Image (cartoon, rainbow, N blue to C red):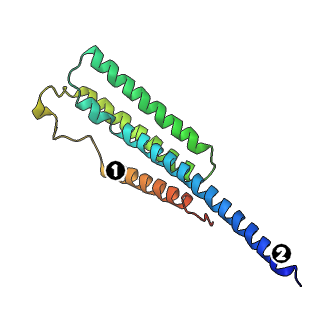
Amino acid sequence: MNWLPPALTAFVAVLTATVGYFITNRLKTLEVRRATYASALLAVETYWRLPYRIRRRADSGPETRGALGERISDAERDLDYYINLMDLDVDDVAARYRALALETRARGTAMRAQAWCMPPADRDDAMPFPERYPDDDRSALEHRDNLHKCKTAMRRRLRLLALR
């Protein structure tokens, strides 16, 4: 029975090292996933804010239109990137993010069209424009609901122990 304590000590050491390795690996994975989710939500928010950038443009010159067009293209590219990135994981987050991003794109396109029709904000008092973009109750609720569902799915995936 002299072999029992050293064997037990070795087993506990191996078990502790293994558990520590898996916990550290899981924490690193969650850190990367958290950053990815935050960036994906930022892409939605950036796209959502495009009409306000357009509305606050200084003038209607070709340089301004070109700069805003580039911003719009970048925002659309980022949104597509995160939709595709999320789709690589076949889970609830991918479906929820896709619904949020597509709904944001649909509403954002309509709001951008309206923003382009507004005069440029060429004076300080034009910056806090009082009018808002059309936001009927149904679509506003749908957007908040999609955002909430997406964040809830993301939080579930960010648990240390992802028990189903």
Tell me the residue at 53%/35% (across/down).
81
Residue 96 lies left or right of residue 105; in this view the side is right
x then y, percent, for residue 89: 62, 48
Tell me the residue at 27%/42% (across/down).
134
Q: Nearer the viewer, mark 1 or mark 2?
A: 2
Tell me the residue at 12%/28% (across/down).
123
Disc on res. 140: 1
Q: Is residue 61 above or below residue 103?
A: above
What amino acid type is highlighted by mark number 2? Ala
Q: Nearer the viewer, residue 5 or 53?
A: 5
x then y, percent, for residue 57: 23, 27
What amino acid type is highlighted by mark number 1? Ala
- The answer to which of marks 1 and 2 sits earlier in the sequence is 2
Query: Is disc 2 placed on a helix, strand or loop?
Result: helix
Tell me the residue at 46%/43% (across/down).
39
Q: How far, Cα to Cα, is label 1 from label 2? A: 63 Å
Residue 18 lies left or right of residue 141; in this view the side is right
Residue 134 lies left or right of residue 2; in this view the side is left
Q: Label 2 neighbourhood size at 10 Å, few (<14), some (14-19), many (20+)?
A: few
Disc on res. 9: none
Q: Is residue 35 above or below residue 5?
A: above
x then y, percent, for residue 13: 73, 69
Q: Nearer the viewer, residue 149 or 15?
A: 15
Task: Kindly indicate the quadrant of the structure image that contains residue 126.
Answer: top left
Task: Kindly indicate the quadrant of the structure image that contains residue 115.
Answer: top left
Q: Residue furthest front?
A: 2
Residue 49 lies left or right of residue 95; in this view the side is left
Task: Kindly indicate the quadrant of the structure image that contains residue 3.
Answer: bottom right
Q: Is residue 85 above or below residue 6?
A: above
Quadrant in which the C terminus appears: bottom right
Q: Label 1 neighbourhood size at 10 Å, few (<14), some (14-19), many (20+)?
A: few
Disc on res. 7: 2
